[in-house]
Image (cartoon, grey):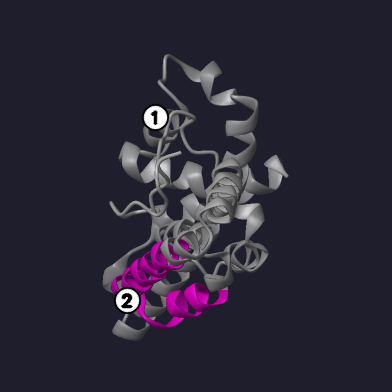
Amino acid sequence: MFEQVRQAMDRLRGVVAELDPARLDGRQARRLVEEFAAIERLAGAGKALAMRRVEATRAWADSGSFRDAAAWLAATGGTTVGHARATVETSAHLEEFPETEAALRGGELSEVQVNEVVSAARSDPSAERLLLDSAKRDGIRGLKDQCARVRAGACVDEAERYQRDPRRAVATSLAGRRRNRPHRHARARRCHGSGHVCAPAI
């Protein structure tokens, strides 16, 4: 596997080194941008998939005095810690969403798209297909709007469950906390990406 990746990287590096945009017409340039974008999506998929194991084994700690896996990934990829942290979170929960993982492996989702889809789907797993359709159709802004609606809906649903049956709603909320592994001192679960409390303090 590593040899295949190195060979692909060497060939791509050679293509980029010899690239002369002035020799391309508009259509050729557009096609080349599309191909490079597809390569970028596949590279992001490989990074997210491998990151799951890096985090699980704490291999990032062997690479220097980094605070956590996100700090290491940010330094490795030349990105912000916030973006890297979203990737780490996505990689940790990707297995919970098989359709999303399949789309990622197929090069259909960018890093930004998969981070948004997984984050929102954790609030409402039944919305996974809706979110994937939005990723294909609506662009990043539209996808973020759809994610916000899914999170808001999950908050409303949980509040209504609590009103109907407080004990059962609390038990459901606790089970969700264990699945999503939030901070152990958190006193109230909040919808991902929002400031709204979705359940009362326990």
The answer, for residue 47, to whether it is visible in the render is: no
Query: Which residue is under mark 2?
Result: 142
Q: Are marks 2 and 1 in contact (CB under 8 Å)?
A: no
Extent of the magenta region:
129-158
Which class describes the residues within 10 Å of circle 2: few (<14), some (14-19), or many (20+)?
A: few
- Left or right: residue 46 versus residue 79 is right
* Quadrant where the image shows the N terminus: top right
Asked if residue 53 is positioned above or below residue 14 in the image, the reply reads above
Nearest to the observer: residue 163 or residue 59: 163
Q: Considering the numbered disc 2 on the image, is that residue within a helix, a strand or a loop?
A: helix
Is 139 in the magenta?
yes
Asked if residue 133 is positioned above or below residue 14 in the image, the reply reads below
Q: Quadrant of residue 28?
A: bottom left
Q: Considering the numbered disc 1 on the image, is that residue within a helix, a strand or a loop?
A: helix
Nearest to the observer: residue 48 or residue 82: 82
Query: Which residue is under mark 1?
Result: 71
